[in-house]
Amino acid sequence: MTSERRVRQVKLAAPSRALVQRGAVLLEDALRTASLPDAPGGRVLVIRELALGTIHADRSPAALSLVVEQRVRELARLAVHATSPSAATAQAVYFRDELEPFVALATRLARGLPLDAWFWRLAVPGLHPGTPRDDGLRRALAGALRTRPGPAAAVMLVSELEALGALAPLLGALRWQDGPALVRAWWGHLPPRPEPRLHLDDAGSAEQVSEVLRSTLSHWTRSWGADDARAVWLAAVALCARVPSQVAAPGLPSRAWRVLAALQASPAAPLTEPRKPPARASPGPEVPAVSPSTSVAQGNASPSPLSREALSDAPASGTERRPLDAAIPASSMGTTASSTPRLTERASPTDNDGTSDASGTPEQDTSPRHVTDEALPTAAGGLLFLVPMLNALGLVEFLADHPSLADLGIPQRFLRYVAERLGVPSTDPLLRVLPEAPAGPLPVPSAFTFPLRFQTGVGARAPFRLVREPTGRSVAFDARTRVPLAATPRGGTLPPPFDSLLAAILEQPLPWDDATLLLRGALLAVGRVTRRRAHMGLRALVLRPGRVVATRTHLDLVFAASQVDIRIRRAGLDINPGWVPWLARVIQYHYQSDETGA
């Protein structure tokens, strides 16, 4: 996959204008065709100066692209993390993923730390040294929403700022006009307040939010008002903080409204002060600014420039801000796709520990749980090949039709169930970085019906078989009575076409509960599809060595070039799925030479 790249400024010097134009054409073609593959984990590389030396007019763009590739790789090997003490003078810095620039930006602004290092204006377009704090914080949130994870990135940003005690400045920077823009960026519209329910139906809804975020949500809900769109957005963020994959749950807006109603109905209590950012330590000696003496081209990893109405044109602090609509393009509202160009390349994790900012103040590492600092070996590298297969079998449709099962993390449970059945140890790095499902078993009963795409994918055709247990539970199977297609509890009615089947009455109940039936049906389905499309068994597909790289936003599998399997490629199972809402990660596969792969 060709990496995205953006060049901010090009400087060419030549005796004549014709030679300058010729050099510009050669350089443009070379930058477009240079092979700069995406680094595993979505690492973002910001280059200060890319000196290419003398460009000969009689050389081809292909020859110049080789020079670009060599120079970029040299800089990538020398790149330091953006929080390193040497970042201000380095020729290249990197961020672990596309969200980290905005997390780091918001953290520094909340702590009152300077943003005069050269790479900030490249990593966050429109940011200038004199940008007011509130405008910069709102720009950080808008930038997070423009990444591929979209609303999930905003959830991660809020969660990490809360963990660092730096969330209050961001929420205080939001104006009432920002609320509609935030909810439109998530759901495409302002969700209406749901119909009132019985008190028992709403009981415990606020308990779905962690204690820390519940206190924060309570404080800002009383400050903004429970009908404020900002409060609805923050309630949805708080509900997804533990399981970011719930950002795509269809019932999330209603749940957010009910959490606000539960907080509003709770006994009045004194407003709790939100957590404040740590006090800024006295800065060390000022680091002199280094003039960017460019030679030929400067490359950066910044997102695409915002619109003319972006926050850079917002008034200074203390005056009315313009809403986040100005910072979020209309094309990105209601979607999770990203238009964020970046220059990515694998960089060494040099100076990544014990870092501090340019002022000498120690900066806390913002990397969350389930993040790897390096590629870790896994014995189940093919487990994520099931992701495109599950999408093809209608998993997204299934989760939309069964919101209660989606909230219980069925996809994550299924991937772990497959690994367990194949003997993958629970300590395998891939299982450790997978998003965790909510603790506890599935409730009984858990009625389900697999979608039509699932039935077609597994080759389930009429006549279907329907069995009824002594307990009254009804289960529909395929014609061979192997793959369960639907189950309903006692007294329930199955949907068409199963409702018209003549049931066979069993003397003894089946040896599986609803949860096991569901997981067993999905396991048999992916096994059938694997044999039919890839002409191999599920064990051969899943149990293949690889290396896993996990960041906040990405989950990448790196395989040795010798691991390329034409059967998997023909079946399309190693095509990058991209953003996967039910895992809340960008999934990518990489094949590298054996010495850098598995």
Image (spheres, rainbow, N blue to C red):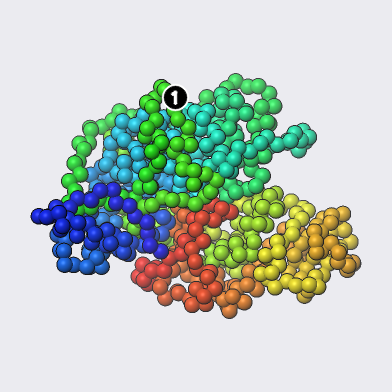
Placement of 388 over or under 281, stated as above or below: below
Q: Residue at x 36, y 29 (%)?
A: 132
Placement of 463 over or under 156, stated as above or below: below
**Visible in this render: residue 241?**
no
Q: Quadrant of residue 138?
A: top left
Q: Residue at x 68, y 65 (%)?
A: 454
Q: Of all residues shown, which one is farthest toward the left? A: 15
Placement of 211 over or under 388, stated as above or below: above
Total numbered labels = 1
- Using residue 495 as the reference point, say whether residue 458 is left or right of it: left
The amino acid type of the residue labelled 1 equals Glu
- Using residue 189 as the reference point, say whether residue 3 is left or right of it: left
Closer to us: 398 or 286:
398
Q: Of all residues shown, which one is farthest toward the front? A: 18
Secondary structure, mark 1, is loop
Tell me where residue 213 appears, x and y as whole percent: 56, 35
Closer to us: 423 or 183:
183
Q: Residue at x 31, y 35 (%)?
A: 128
The quadrant of the rendering that contains the C terminus is bottom left
Tell me where residue 184 appears, x and y as whole percent: 55, 40
| Residue tagged 1 | 320
Tell me where residue 116 appears, x and y as whole percent: 28, 36
**Visible in this render: residue 147?**
yes
- Using residue 125 as the reference point, say whether residue 550 is left or right of it: right
Near mark 1 (Cα within 10 A), the count class, few <14, some 14-19 or many ≥20, is few
Tell me where residue 358 appears, x and y as whole percent: 28, 38
Q: Residue at x 67, y 65 (%)?
A: 453
The quadrant of the rendering that contains the N terminus is bottom left
Closer to us: 358 or 566:
566
Q: Quadrant of residue 463?
A: bottom right
